[in-house]
Amino acid sequence: MAETRTEALHQNAEGLDVQAPAAILSFLANAQIEAAKAVHGAIPAIAEAAELIARQLKSGGRLAYAAAGSSGLMAVADALELPGTFGIARDRIAILIAGGDEAFRTLAGGPEDDTEEAAAAVANANIGKGDCLIAISASGSTPYAVQAIGDARRRGAATVAIANNKGAPLFEQADVAILLETPPELIAGSTRMGAGTAQKIALNMLSTLTAIHLGHVHDGYMVNLTADNIKLRDRAVRMVSAITGRSRDEAARLLEESGGVVKTAILLAAGAANADAAEKILEGTGQKLRPALSAIEGSKRR
């Protein structure tokens, strides 16, 4: 039986509704901070999960998220950012949320109990061998999430579980279990608060470390971003300029020559003969920019 800390009463909850507004807000802020601290204890598990996910993506697999309610919103927020931030193709990501598209309008509670919907979602997304599914549930016992991770595992997918209660049923089907031991919510059971905050932080950490393993980050720059608006095109120019030491005008020219691909533009600045040559170098280094730069530098010395 899971220890349901997410349903327990917070030590500062008694008389909360008669406190002064500033005091209530102070309690709420402090509760969020305490919840965020819980992520530190999960760092080893998050690191293991990121390595697993990166391995599946490198091999051509997909990354799927399965969750309900507030946990579903945390999953959606993480998943939808990956293409723009790290250039992970949208068709490599699947989002399974209880209630489907209707969840974005009503977020009704009933669908989280619908195991048939979860099974259908996994099957329709064709989650299986080579893929990785992350299931998220504050309680760790949400039927939708438990069914989804179980079905994904039976179909051969790698699995990661994120929950906020020890002994969660969700962990039983996980290759990697990420326990976020958040304290009880100030509003008992309102896991959109502390538990959700910890989930969002953990997902940010997980997807960012995965992207680093995939070679999508260099010196803190998102060098695999998809520059599909004015802000991101400007960011791409600034990245190429900062990493290569070239002027913004020259960086913009290199980006145009590279077809808008940041890594390729940087390698052109480093001495790659052309965009095709730069891309072949990146293929040989697993899309990692640092060894690609070293390879060009080494060829110059020979």
Image (cartoon, rainbow, N blue to C red):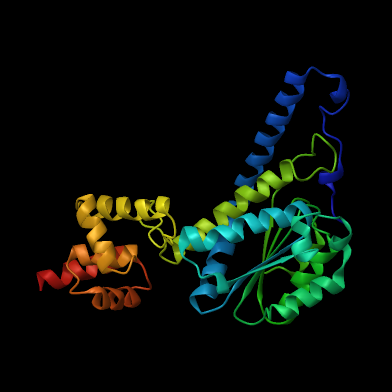
Residue 148 located left or right of residue 289: right
Residue plotted at (67% across, 50% down): 199
Q: Position of residue 154 (x, y in %)?
A: 75, 80
Q: Closer to the camera, 3 or 237?
A: 237
- The quarter of the rendered structure image containing the C terminus is bottom left
- The quarter of the rendered structure image containing the N terminus is bottom right
Residue 172 located left or right of residue 159: right
Above or below for 174 versus 247: below
Q: Position of residue 112 (x, y in %)?
A: 84, 61
Residue plotted at (79% across, 17% down): 20
Q: Quadrant of residue 287?
A: bottom left
Q: Closer to the camera, 141 or 227?
A: 227
Residue 76 located left or right of residue 122: left
Q: Closer to the camera, 35 or 75?
A: 75
The outermost residue toward the left is 302
Q: Position of residue 258 (x, y in %)?
A: 28, 68
Above or below for 192 versus 133: above
